Image (cartoon, helix red, strand yellow):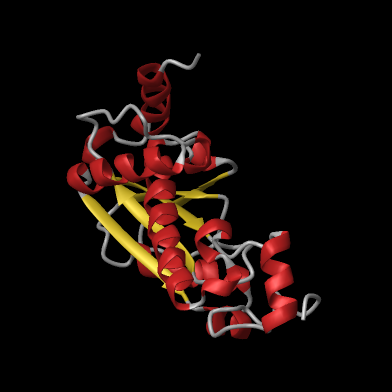
């Protein structure tokens, strides 16, 4: 069984190599590149070394209830948090990669970091140094924290969308193309938060 403290310390150890000479290190991640509906959401987070939040990890490795709890801890302790998002209409207009870059730039805009550790995405044009990492949310404490903030933020948006458009099951599928979701699309057609460029084969 994984030792949570050791896991968190190993993630922090990666970030610590960049923290010399009072350098401010931020982590950035996105959620929502693949769904058929909803915004793409990004987060930029600067975390202190103490207290170490032992459950910070890749958001996909945590249960929904655990993510919610860790999210609140991150909000309480983070030095800086920026959120960026791009709507389905704009995703359709500029494509999902450009939308992700735009959302990341918006998230980083008011975060005064010297170095941005970024999960996979490159060439954002930020003021600080950009370091893209493949599987960054499983490598860096800051990116893992950002992955949790972005995931919970987007999941809450999809829960609200479920109240507005209950026929699609957004609270359960978070906008991803599950069988239930695709069947609802075929029956009801798209709703205002669907990405038209993503659903062409299903309606």
Asked whether 69 or 148 is in front, the reply is 69
Query: Residue 189's spot in the image, x, y percent?
Result: 68, 84
Residue 108's place in the image compared with 60, above or below, is below
Q: Is residue 194 left or right of residue 67?
A: right
Q: Residue at x 72, y 80 (%)?
A: 187
Query: Going 50% across and 34% down the picture, which residue do you hit?
Result: 139
User: With respect to residue 60, does 163 lie above or below?
Assistant: below
With respect to residue 114, does 198 lie above or below? below
Left or right of 77, for residue 151: right
Residue 125 can be seen, yes or no: no
Q: Is residue 14 visible to the viewer in this orientation of the structure? A: yes
- The residue sitting at 49% across, 64% down in the picture is 124
Number of on-image labels: 0
Residue at the far right: name it.
201
- Which of 186/176 is in front? 186
Spot occupied by residue 104 in the image (x, y as percentages of width and height): 44, 64
Residue 17, x across and y down, in percent: 37, 30
Query: Residue 177, located in which quarter of the rendered image?
Result: bottom right
Above or below residue 84? Residue 133 is above
- Quarter placement of the C terminus: bottom right
Q: Position of residue 161 (x, y in %)?
A: 46, 72
Quadrant of the image occupied by residue 33: bottom right
Between residues 74 and 64, which one lies in front from this camera angle? 64
**In the drawing, does residue 186 fall left or right of residue 84?**
right
């Amino acid at each position: 069984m994984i030792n949570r403290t050791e896991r968190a310390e190993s993630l922090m150890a990666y970030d610590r190599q960049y923290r010399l000479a009072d350098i401010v290190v931020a982590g950035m991640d996105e959620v929502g590149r693949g769904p058929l509906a909803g915004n793409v959401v990004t987060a930029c987070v600067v975390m202190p070394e103490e207290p170490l939040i032992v459950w910070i990890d890749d958001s996909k490795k945590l249960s929904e209830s655990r993510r919610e709890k860790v999210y609140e801890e991150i909000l309480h302790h983070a030095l800086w948090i920026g959120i960026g998002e791009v709507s389905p209409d704009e995703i359709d207009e500029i494509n999902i990669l450009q939308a992700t870059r735009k959302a990341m730039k918006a998230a980083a805009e008011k975060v005064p970091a010297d170095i941005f550790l970024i999960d996979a995405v490159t060439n954002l044009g930020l003021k600080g140094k950009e370091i893209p990492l493949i599987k960054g949310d499983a490598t860096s404490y800051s990116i893992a924290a950002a992955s949790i903030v972005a995931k919970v933020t987007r999941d809450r948006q999809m829960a609200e969308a479920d109240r507005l458009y209950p026929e699609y099951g957004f609270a359960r599928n978070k906008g991803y193309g599950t069988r239930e979701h695709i069947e609802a699309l075929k029956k009801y057609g798209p709703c205002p938060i669907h990405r038209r460029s993503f659903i062409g084969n299903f309606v």
